[in-house]
Amino acid sequence: MANIMTSNTASTEGKKRRLRGGGRYGSLGDRVFDTCNIIFMLLLMVVTLYPFVNTLAVSLNNATDSIRGGIYLWPREFTLQNYSYVFNEATILGATFISIMRTVIGTIVTVFCSAMVAYTISRPDFVLRKFITIAFILTMYFNGGLIPNFLLIRDLGMINSFWVYIIPGIIGVFNLIIIRSFIEGLPESILESARIDGAGDFTTFAKIVLPLSLPVLATVALFTAVWQWNSWFDVFLYNSSEIKLSTLQYELQKILQNSNASMSAKSAGDAFANADNANANMVTPFSIRATMTIVASVPIILVYPFLQKYFVKGMTVGGVKG
Amino acid sequence: MAKEASPGIQTTTPKPQTSHIPLFFKKLVQQRVLLLMSAPFLIWLFIFKYLPLWGWTIAFQDFKPAKSFSDQKWVGFEHFKMLFQDEKFIQVLRNTLAMSTINLVLGFVTAIVLALLLNELRFVLFKRLVQTVSYLPHFISWVVAANIIATALSPDNGIVNELLMWLGVIKEPILFLGIPEYFWGINGLSEVWKNVGWNTIVYLAAMTMIDPAQYEAAEIDGAGRIQRIWHITLPGIKPVIIVLLIMNIGYLLESGFEPQYLLGNGMNVDYSENLDIFVLKYGIAMGNFSLSVAAGMFKTVISFILLFAANYTAKRMGESRLF
């Protein structure tokens, strides 16, 4: 959050605004408006950030002490016990590993495959161009639904396998569209000169188009990485009986589910099934939940401010092209 | 025939008697690299996106997973009839429509208001800081968000209860997620908290297209801030608002799945369960595949019609369609 230098679409607009403001800060009404606006924005930031700060404080606070309540912005009895407990659990360590693996592998595969298909449908003379484009775009309007998809994955033998995280999602239509429109915007002369030098389609794609498309590929990579990191439903649906393939988000989901169930049953006692009795004095479900929440969101919180402009570009470009 | 159809291609295929079909294959052979680059993904597309449609046959059968396709008993529209007589299904349909309508209205109004206010901020650095912070919840998963929301709404030291008690609005902590009638509102506000900042992007981009001369002219005419927002900025982004609104109506049956599933519990189930959860419960948990597929199919077909209608309307209105 410290990085406020990250540019966004509004920068040019800011310039216009300063020009038209002309240095005059206007009437009393204007100043009242500005003050209210700034107060509103500060409130918005508090509402957005407070839950994260509070969760961080709880995760760094002594677990038994947290039950007393009254933890707001910083820990009362600072400790790293919650984190050392979480990272000593074999399940959580394994889940962290799988989360990282699916994010890295899934992103590389998706970006490469989407770019390749996007390249083929950007070639104006490719005879299957229209057919492939329509075949992909149609799938935005319908899908087989939960059960048919589940049965398909089962029949393909992908239950309890790592590849169920990668293969069903290798190409997103949205990604395809924004990469295609980027490639179509590249100067045709560059591709033409490669062809004159004797480069085939694959060489042109790998050596010329891929490096030139880095900005849009970065956007797609980021969308994909965030989506992979945040996914839990495919774990729940296909791999819930294989603990080795669990992910951080799914482990956190199970903790949330347990605490929901205990809320309905009004028995807060054994909410966290994984916490064995030896540790019961040191950690509580409440603290574990907070700690896991931080662990599952920190990579994203650290990374997104620096990559914001790519996301914003993807939103504004992808939003109008079809 | 080939002569008049493809004069340009004549240079590469100088046989005048070629008809369309061999020409097509001839070109395909020439473009075999492109074909090799795309064919694996066409097969992938067919398997993962089109093949599951075959599964819709399950809705018309008395499906038993152990039996082969030819051994299944066909029952026609029996499951659809059952669906519409099922009180649970009607309730779930109500929840879906209610929540997506609330999300639609709330999401639109808050995003537009926030975009207008952000646009009025004079200090560029402050504006960027607010934007960066407001994007944060969009990037975190719903699992994390649901955890945060459940903690904030908790009756045991949850910040919302503490704040309301401190302000004297309530005397006893409220079990917010345990009161069914509150769920639609909680769901709508959660959606706003998570996505309002992100949803301003499109509007802010549209605002940069407004001619600054309009503002100068209005200022000279003595228009105040509110008047300028109302008469210049808002009309300036009107086309974008209309297109987004139409497109969103296309997604009316997509009320979301994750927030309802993650924040839902045994107490608020009558208001939190939507179509997607219904499909999941009947299909995966209870093993009633046929009824579940019928419900899923109903949703997809209606959505398909709505989306096409929305897309068509947006196009007719002369705006660039979104998808």
Image: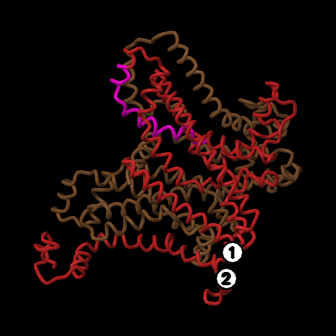
Chain colours: A brown, B red
Image spot of residue B240 (x, y percent): 44, 41
> Taking A23 as reference, is A190 left or right?
left
Residue B288 visible in the snapshot = yes
Q: Is disc 1 on the same chain as disc 2?
A: yes
> Taking B164 as reference, is A108 left or right?
left
Q: Residue at x 50, y 54 (%)?
A: A224
Q: Residues within 10 Å of mark 2 (few under 14, many from 20)?
A: few
Q: Is residue A32 above or below residue A304?
A: above
- Residue to which mark 1 is pinned: B79
- Residue to which mark 2 is pinned: B75
- Residue B263 located within the stretch drawn in magenta: no
Indicate the quadrant where residue A79 lies: top right
Q: Amino acid at mark 1?
A: His
| Label 1: element kind | helix
| Label 2: element kind | loop
Q: Residue at x 55, y 58 (%)?
A: A101
Image spot of residue B85 (x, y percent): 74, 68
On-image quarter of the N terminus of chain A:
top right
Foreground residue among A151 and B112: B112
- Residue B213 located within the stretch drawn in magenta: yes
